[in-house]
């Protein structure tokens, strides 16, 4: 199964084939702030995070089971002064919700990576 992803940040958007390659551009040094990883579809270990340039000490992983509304969770994360980057997957999000998340991220200057699990045509 092929997947696609895109990176969105406050200054520009770009395409990338793999979220794990996006960390250099988006989730690099967050200057003591958190990287929120919201509803990952896989198990993330400290070693896996470290392998891709994300410190386990600054990763806030919010599992799907703990989320009532993913859209609202993303908006809250974007507005938090202690979160500098958000990583999520587009399952359960509509195109309108993704647009609103991007706009919120831009207005709060929060970096965002949205990974798509949808098949390419």
Image (cartoon, rainbow, N blue to C red):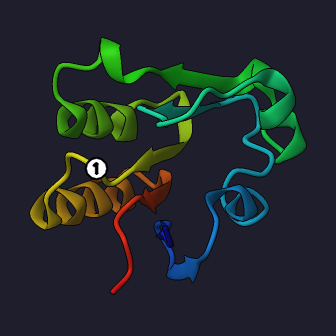
Query: Which residue sits at x=47%, y=31%?
Result: 81
The answer to which image quadrant residue 43 occupies is top right
Residue 9 location, x and y as percent? 50, 66
Up-down: is 82 above or below 98?
A: above
Q: Is residue 64 left or right of residue 50?
A: left
Residue 110 location, x and y as percent? 48, 51
Instruction: Count all numbered tags in the image, as a single digit.
Output: 1
Q: Residue furthest top?
A: 66
Residue 22 location, x and y as percent? 68, 63
> 51 or 3, which is in the foreground?
3
Secondary element at image label 1? loop
Q: Is residue 89 left or right of residue 54?
A: left
Query: Which residue sits at x=15%, y=67%?
Result: 95
> 78 or 50, which is in the foreground?
50
Up-down: is 27 above or below 63?
A: below
Identify residue for label 1.
Answer: 91
Q: Is residue 13 left or right of residue 34?
A: left
Residue 120 location, x and y as percent? 38, 80
Query: Which residue sits at x=18%, y=19%?
Result: 68
Q: Residue furthest bottom?
A: 121
Query: Which residue sits at x=50%, y=72%?
Result: 2
Up-down: is 34 above or below 54?
A: above
Position of the C terminus by quadrant: bottom left
Crowd class of label 1 (few under 14; some 14 to 19; many from 20; radius 10 Å): some
> 91 or 98, which is in the foreground?
91
> 92 or 8, which is in the foreground?
92
């Amino acid at each position: 199964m092929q997947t696609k992803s895109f990176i969105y940040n406050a200054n520009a958007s770009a395409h990338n084939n793999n979220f794990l390659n996006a960390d250099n551009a988006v989730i690099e040094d967050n200057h003591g702030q958190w990287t929120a990883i919201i509803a990952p579809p896989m198990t993330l270990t400290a070693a896996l995070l470290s392998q891709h340039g994300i410190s386990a000490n600054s990763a806030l992983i919010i599992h799907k089971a703990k989320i009532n509304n993913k859209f609202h969770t993303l908006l809250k994360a974007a507005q938090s002064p202690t979160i500098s980057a958000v990583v999520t997957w587009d399952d359960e999000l509509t195109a309108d919700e993704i647009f609103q998340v991007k706009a919120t991220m831009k207005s709060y200057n929060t970096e965002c990576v949205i990974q798509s699990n949808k098949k390419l045509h």
